Image: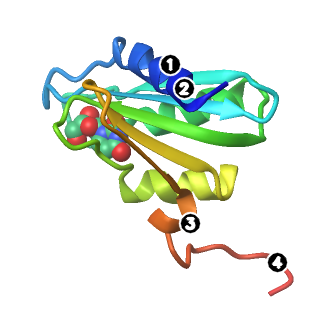
Amino acid sequence: MDKKALIEEARLGRDNASAPFSKYKVGAALLTTDGRVYRGCNVENCTYALTVCAERVALLSAIAAGDRKFTAIAVVTQSENPASPCGPCRQLLWEYCGDIDVTIANLDGKAETMKLSELLPRPFSFSLED
Ligand code: THU
């Protein structure tokens, strides 16, 4: 699947966003090495604190479905400048996806792609042998 198609998947994911508090809808689409796509959207909550980002919804859906190998994620927001994933999402994506391509896009087709390692230099990780 090419970048444009993955952005479209993220845009479709965004349609299901539940963002009554921020009014800021986010969609994500996570691509597996064998071509499956998991969509996500942000889901907000009235305590605010329990809100889950679109990226995490996509990742946790993929893991729950048994997928563990990923190549790229696209994130779509309504903002004039495409928004990049928040810090906690970067950490979680790193742990489960490694150095995948991250494409951020807005609804007007403005898009940019970078490696996750550019967004999260020197990430926290550990192994039991350390
Ligand atoms: N949000 C995401 O879904 N992904 C991010 O990487 C950053 C923020 C959501 C959380 C909240 O529902 C809304 O955007 C405004 O912060």
Please tell me how crowded label 2 is: few (under 14), some (14-19), or many (20+) other residues with Cα within 10 Å.
Answer: many
Q: Is residue 15 above or below residue 88?
A: above
Q: Earlier in the sequence, mark 3 or mark 4?
A: 3
Q: Nearer the viewer, mark 3 or mark 4?
A: 3
Residue behind mark 3:
117
Of marks 4 and 2, the one in the foreground? 2
| 120 shown above or below 28 | below
Identity of the amino acid at label 3? Ser
Q: Is residue 50 visible?
A: no
Q: Are marks 2 and 3 in contact (CB under 8 Å)?
A: no
Badge 3 element: helix
Q: Looking at the image, do the residues carrying marks 1 and 4 touch, with CB atoms under 8 Å apart? A: no
- Residue drawn where x is 45% and y is 63% of the image: 119
Q: Based on the displayed image, in which of its 4 quarters is residue 11 positioned?
A: top left
**Which residue matches tag 4?**
128
Determine which of the numbered discs, if any, sits on residue 6 in the image.
2
Residue 43 location in percent, x, y? 34, 26
Task: Classify mark 4: helix, strand or loop.
Answer: loop
